[in-house]
Amino acid sequence: MKKIISISLLINFYILCPIFSFAENITDTTSTADGNTYYSSNNSMIETKNSLTTETINDKESTLSSSSDYLSKEKKAYFEQANLVMSTSLTGNGTVASPFKVYNEDHLATVAKMINDSSYTTTTNSGTVYINLMSDITLDGNMINFINNRNPIIIDGATNHNNVNNFSIFFTGNSTSGYGLFSLGSANMTITFKNINFGSKEFAKNNYYGFCQTTKANNTINIQDVNYYAEEGGQPFYSTGSNSVLNFIGYNTFVVTSNGVSNQEFAEFSGAINFKEDSKTAIVQKTNTSLAFIWIHSNLTMNVESNAEVFIQSGKTELFYPSKPASLNIDSKAKFTYLFDNKLTYIDPSTVFADPSTYQYITVTGNTGATSNNFFDSNSTLDIFIDEQAQLNFITSNLPFQTGKLVINSQDSSSVKFMNQTQTNPALNSKNTSIDIKNSTTNNTIYNFRKSPNKNGDPISELVLPNKSSETLTNNLSNYNVLAFEPAVKVGGVSAMGSSGFDVESKTPFSKITSQLTDVSSTLDSHYTYKAQYYITSDTNNILSDTTLNNLYKDTVQVATHIDGSINKPVNTIPSTPTITSDKTTSATLNHLFSGMYIIYGRLAVINTSDNQTFYTTWNHLSTEIKPYQAVTLPTLIDINADVNYRSVNNKPELIFNNKTTYPISNQSNQIINIKPTLLIEKNQNNIDIVPDKPNINNDKKKLQLQLISNPYNLQWNLGDLTSLQSLELQPYWDTSHNKTNFNLGGAYSGPYLTTSPATLNYTVVFSINPK
């Protein structure tokens, strides 16, 4: 941009979720054994029903179906007060509009035969098969077998629209028979058990081949809002066909305990076990038969989906048996806890999703018989992937975890913890065990692999940098009762603001970038201090690598202004929770920058004061702009009379200009500026002419040669000839040696020195000012 500045020459010689209860007038149709149909419509019945529902609804997460006596009384009262006529006939055709309504085991067997027939899907129902339980059902050991039906099957035990006081399925058969309560007898089938209580204190027997057995391939079992209780024959799942899928949906509890016989694994399985998004599943598997928590028939994948919670309390010798590869994937904000305790006393599953201090214990005497606590029965690999803000806990109450290689990939997880509650015994045993954790962070977090010694002493910290792995631990594992891999130092990013102008208070120009690290936090103790480090470059065409930046960055002494591109800000402490205040403590300013676009790189250095070892987060970057700021100071008035002396040369008078009187021109801009005079404008009436060449002193007409002379730059501007003058280049304001120059006057005069009146000269000089 070109600016024109004028000077005159004068010569006179700056959630709660509201619960709505709906009561409506309804008509219910029921059928009886004699074939007659009855209709019941009763307003008072509806009011009684709703009153009972309101009084008996409990928080789903605090209700455990452990007493069939309690449930049967409530349901009996429900039907008595509702004055309903109970039907004992099977009705419905399995469609969503007319679900099967079953009241006993014979109905279930009949439904299975109906839908197993190939004509069912072609003539009656080509979609999902709906089966609604209408009462508690007791199975005596005759397996309900579903076969050949490729349509999904849903067995729903809900008693009303609020799914309160769900119906139960009890078992009185042989706990060790070679089949389950239900069976999928062919491949590619899907069945859902929903809103059902399996077993109770009163009916505490089950079958260790599972409440749904399948040995066929590609079968899926969905468990939704189910409570399971067994003291004998407790093995809920037996799915050994290839590519089996077991899904847990909603809120589920499983209890298998006591010193009864034939209590096996939680599952014999082959395929994928999925704890679905937002679900909560609590499992107790503690009996005097040691075995394993899961018997793997082929490679096993266990997925805990986002925001799901899984709590497992086991007293089994192995987590997995036998030694086959297994993987555990814990998605974002999910939580997986495995607690080993070889005593039969267990935590009430309905209390485990609150604070640990509120756990309620069910006292059962005896122990499980487990004399060791293994990931596998022999050495194998457990691959664990844990996503952002997710938690993984392996807790033991006495015997340490051992055998197996643990390979853990942490993707910004909340914590990975191995802990022995005794605090004096190891969490992991060195016998055939190793642990390797990789910090695959995307948000620039340094993790602390903290190890708490069994004996008195401070925890040992191992800082694991982004995209690095911890030291593989083997031989010394038994020295620690807690091994916790948790975020230590977080840096969310970097912010920057470019600014330029003139500070009125300090009367100084500025052209700077102020940067700070954002979302900064640290859980490290006082043995660590920090530095916020920045590198600023005008190269906006390339994003520099960490290696390049490490070579370019200079850990200079913190100064307010410099232009080498590097600056740092020492920080003594950083709070454990990110705050705006902690971000401000990392703020640093790099001043004296040219206008233009820049990229700012920032990182945090973490210094261990005990050994001065330094760890670094990865570089974050951001672009910002400094706007052009232009300010040039020129002399406003040059008085020639103040600069003139006289002398005689060869008896002739001569005008001599005084070069000790100077006129400064300075640049306060954040740019390089080129300046030169471009126009001379005559003001008022002048009786002296300014000429380009030295005038003839013999000429009686008054003529003046007038020059602005800069000695440091050897620059001369002849104001009588402005056509080909050299530009003056001035550097930005911070280059104090080259941002200004001092001019003095020079020239010659032809006219008479002695006149009856002063000679008049009044011109304006116009300058051009252009950024380079």
Image (cartoon, rainbow, N blue to C red):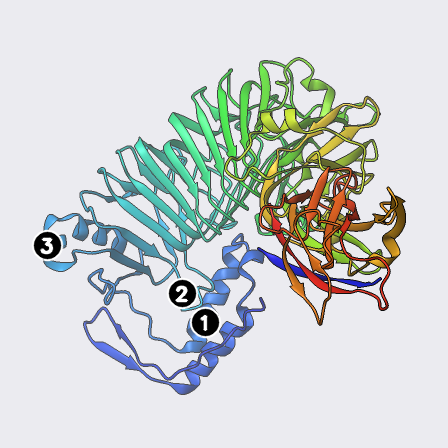
Residue 37 in sight: yes
Q: Position of residue 172 (x, y in %)?
A: 39, 45
Distance of label 3 from label 2 (alpha carbons): 31 Å
Residue 450 in sight: no
Residue 159 shows which numbered tag?
2
Near mark 2 (Cα within 10 A), the count class, few <14, some 14-19 or many ≥20, is: some
- The answer to whether residue 208 is above or below residue 16 is above
Distance of label 1 from label 2 (alpha carbons): 10 Å
Res. 713 image quadrant: top right
The residue at which mark 3 appears reads as 122
Rendered-image quadrant of the C terminus:
top right
Near mark 3 (Cα within 10 A), the count class, few <14, some 14-19 or many ≥20, is: few
Amino acid beneath label 3:
Thr
Residue 78 shows which numbered tag?
1
Among numbered discs 1 and 2, the one appearing first in the sequence: 1
Q: Nearer the viewer, residue 34 or 51?
A: 51
Nearer the camera: disc 1 or disc 2: 2
| Residue appearing at x 58%, y 22% in the figure | 436
Res. 126 image quadrant: bottom left
Instruction: Please report contact status of discs 1 and 3: CB closer than 8 Å, yes or no.
Output: no
Among numbered discs 1 and 3, the one appearing first in the sequence: 1
Q: Position of residue 607 (x, y in %)?
A: 77, 29
Amino acid beneath label 1:
Tyr
Name the element at disc 2. loop
**What residue occupies the far bottom of the structure in this picture?**
43
Name the element at disc 3. helix
Q: Position of residue 423 (x, y in %)?
A: 76, 29
Q: Nearer the viewer, residue 670 or 600?
A: 670
Name the element at disc 1. helix
Amino acid beneath label 2:
Thr
Q: In the displayed structure, does residue 139 sit left or right of residue 361?
A: left
Instruction: Please report contact status of discs 1 and 2: CB closer than 8 Å, yes or no.
Output: yes
